[in-house]
Image: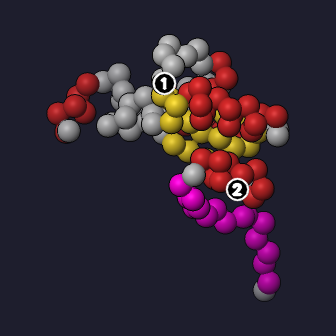
Amino acid sequence: MNTLTTTKRATARYVGALVADVHNILINGGIYAYPATRLNPNGKLRLLYECAPMSMIMEQAGGAGSTGRGRILDVRPTEIHGRTPVFLGSVENVYELDQFFQYYGDDSDDDSYAEDL
């Protein structure tokens, strides 16, 4: 029996340069993620210089940009070098990721993990 699978395998690719990674996402599809971590709870990439411009490019190309809690372009900067988590990709992928964060939440409001550091 010959069965055809219609599922596309997911692969991980990380160039290490935001522009190159976003270009790869635009060409090949997928999602770019630079989430918040325990050491960097506000993320590492800067909102005004990196996240917002790439999010605008993604949205103009038919994709989306999110912080995991909402649209990047809706974030109001509070400082010039303010940082934020960033997720860039297709509308479907970013929406699914936002739903994941909404359902599972995160423990950034809970200080119990500070003991682990």
> What kind of element bears circle 1?
loop
Examine the rendering and report whether any part of residue 52 can be seen. Answer: yes
At label 2, counting other C-alpha atoms closer than 10 Å, the crowd grade (few under 14, some 14-19, many 20 or more) is some
Q: Residue at x 74, y 38 (%)?
A: 58
* Residue with the mark numbered 2: 24
Asked where in the image residue 52 lies, by quadrant, the reply is top right
Quadrant holding the N terminus: bottom right
Q: Residue at x 56, y 58 (%)?
A: 14
Measured as percent of width and height from the top left, residue 74 is found at 65, 18
* Residue with the mark numbered 1: 81
Asked where in the image residue 117 lies, by quadrant, the reply is top left
Measured as percent of width and height from the top left, residue 99 is found at 60, 33
Badge 1 amino acid:
His
Measured as percent of width and height from the top left, residue 72 is found at 63, 26
The magenta segment = 2-16
Badge 2 amino acid:
Asn
Q: Residue at x 25, y 33 (%)?
A: 113
Q: In front of the other: label 2 or label 1?
A: 1
The reply to whether the C-beta atoms of the residues labelled 2 and 1 are less than 8 Å apart is no
* Position above or below: 23 against 63: below
